[in-house]
Amino acid sequence: MTDFIPQLPLGDWFEVLVDLADRIFGWLFNGVNVFLRNFIGGIDDLLTGIPAIILIPILAILIGLIVKSQLTKRRDNGPEDKRPLIIGGIVAAGVFAFFFIILLVGLWETEIGIIIFFTILAWLAAGRITLTVLTALGLLLIYSMGLWESAIATIALVLVSSLMALIIGIPVGILAAKKASFGDNIVRPVLDFMQTMPAFVYLIPAIILFQRGNVAGSIATIIFAMPPVVRLTNLGIRQVPGDVMEAAKSLGSTGKQLLLKIQLPIALPTILAGINQTIMLALSMVVIASMIGAGGLGYDVRSALSRVDIAYGFEAGVAVVILAMIIDRMTQALGDKAPGQ
Amino acid sequence: MSTHLEVKNLYKIFGPSPLKALKMSQEGKTKEEILKETGNTVGVKDASFAVEKGETFVVMGLSGSGKSTLIRNLNRLQDPTSGTVEFDGKNIVEMSEEELRYVRRKHMSMVFQNFGLFPHRSVVDNVSYGLEIQGVPYQERRERAYESLKLVGLKGYEESKPSELSGGMQQRVGLARALVLDPDILLMDEAFSALDPLIKRQMQDELLDLQEKVQKTIVFITHDLDEALKLGDRIAVMYEGEIVQIGTPEQILTEPANDYVRNFVENVDRSKVLPAENIMTKPLAVVESKEGPKAAIRKMERERISSIFVVDNKRRLQGVVDIADVKKLADEGNKSVKSVMKTDFHTTSPDTLIVDLLPMASEAKYPIAVVNDDNKLLGVIVRVSVISGISRKGGNNDD
């Protein structure tokens, strides 16, 4: 090291900054902490402990609706045809009665109900029989490996973190597209920073500001997972063809109408690709976040690593892969179905 | 007729310091000088014109001549650097966003070269968009959109997606989308330029038909001279951002304002533009029906022609006689030519296009007689001038 260039204590400065933030905005971080903890915990509780008396009717109605819409599509007799509605109703009642009997004889398990629920979601998202069957089989495999509770914890963490990343990221992406100077001079460098900073580094200030646990993991995940949806929202809106924009303006659109009726719908497939990427990144990050006390499958992977338990580690890893595949295929299918292609 | 849209001293300059460039342009510096000195591009320079109600006003120029910029200044998709655009006496340039939106929604619609359709909406939803954003109820806007689509010949395609339609059909959607708002002014920016030639011609014909029905004021941008001549009541020729001539199609062809316009119109097929009166000649000899065969023979011999038109004392066309028939009459001592007068010749009105005379010229035994509404003989057109009128490159005035 030469003496000409002074050593900048950049890291120290950042530490001071984090400390300062903690001291000044502690109340804010506390609020965020409480909110996220309850949100994640609530989703987790819902998915593990939802009473059969609520879940069973939901399943019955969803199955009835699917049957009805399938029949309507097949028969194609227009809205006057009441048969699909009637048959759908009968199926729903049958499903309800079947599950209810199972409940009465004491064989009902919430886990099974939730697996059926996710299977239905897969069908609603993609409408493809293969994905639906694989979803059911994959979830059953996780259940049979004894990793169900961890998987639910991971899903809750991913769900909340992704949702937060989207709630912040999509508006930022829209703003970046609308104001080119803001997008190019501020958002882009910040996103570059967020994406290239090693993921582990986020964990450190997250611990200081939010203590070890799910919330700190979620915060790190939100920051890590946000860039794709911001970038792709920005890109999608900027890619709306110039003549389409001119046409919409020439017809007398307001800025809001332009955004809601033209730009966002046309950009939707691109935005959905961003949402897909964000969710996938969130899933990969919650595993890393187990290092600062986030629960779920990441915890299993980490404890398998520390015990050098090959079997346990493999099972936990497979469970992560299964979740990733299911979430990825479902969100991608949503993107393929979007209009504006 | 009244002035509907008036543009006065409109400038549009692109670049870092438009006002500086504006001053230079007003001082008479050329486009190149301004670009070199300030880095600004003069898009439109000092454009002024007025469009009458119900008129089709064509702005014609090659790419880069500023015509697309000009039309975007009319509804302020681009804001002019200087000048005024008056619509029914109100200056659009100075309007607030809200007033401008009102004009766009109610009075001025635009059709685009690449259609600018909304890919995520069905055809009917594309057309009804303009009504939707004004808050017109669902049922009403659908009905109006269906009607508009019927008007442009797209009945039955209402629920299709734009991507499922051919180019010509897509542009009909664009047209229907503009017409559904029942605007006073239609701005058409190279509306047919992206279509293949056959479809293009068909769309031009349909626009002319449509214009008869709806009587809109149209500002039509094109780089295609044939299209300009076909559609325009008047044409403005643009070159390097300036309007170099405004005139009727005939004026543009016969009295080009400068060498640029002259070069431009040189290769035009005049027969499609110029009417019959441009190639008719004064009938060299005409026999009044009361004159005898001898007078007829004398006139034909003097002019070295083999047939002659017969008119009454008010110059109304009666028929035509052959020299052979008249000679026979004279030998027989007959006093009137009426008995050998024939009527199997073609007549035409003076404003029939030359190209439409071609079929009759090719089979005519006699010259074509040009008559007015009262059947008065105005002139004759001999076959050779129909043919040459088509092939000739120069017009009557610049031979």
Image (cartoon, coloured by chain):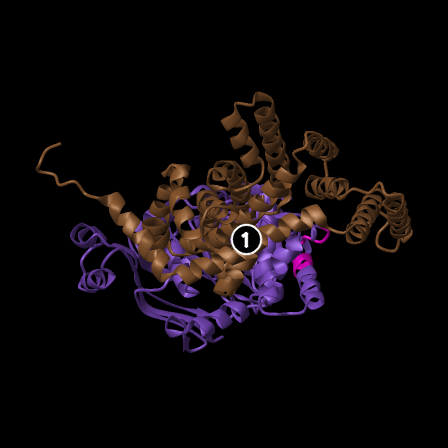
Chain colours: A brown, B purple
**In magenta stretch: residue A219:** no
Instruction: Using the image, determine if residue B310 lies above or below residue A155.
Output: below
In front: A135, or B127?
A135
Residue B291 appears anywhere in the view: no
**Which amino acid type is marked by label 1?**
Arg
Q: Which residue is mark 1?
A: A37
In front: A94, or B303?
A94
Please, which chain is the residue tagged with disc 1 on?
A: A
In front: B350, or A137?
A137
Tell me where residue A283 appears, x and y as whole percent. Answer: 54, 38
Instruction: Using the image, determine if residue B238 lies above or below residue A117.
Output: below
Tell me where residue B65 appears, x and y as whole percent. Answer: 34, 52
Tell me where residue B202 appears, x and y as whole percent. Answer: 59, 48
Disc 1 on helix, strand or loop?
helix
Residues in magenta, as a range? B148-156
**In magenta stretch: residue B153:** yes
Instruction: Using the image, determine if residue B204 lies above or below residue A330.
Output: below
Tell me where residue B137 appears, x and y as whole percent. Answer: 67, 69
Residue A33 appears anywhere in the view: yes
**Where, by quadrant of the figure, is residue B365 drawn?**
top right
Q: Is residue A341 left or right of residue A213?
A: right
Residue density around tag 1, few if under 14, some if 14–19, many if 20 or more, within 10 Å: some
Residue at horizontal 35 percent and vertical 62 percent from the top: A24
Furthest toward the top, the residue is A310
**Where, by quadrant of the figure, is residue A101 drawn?**
top right
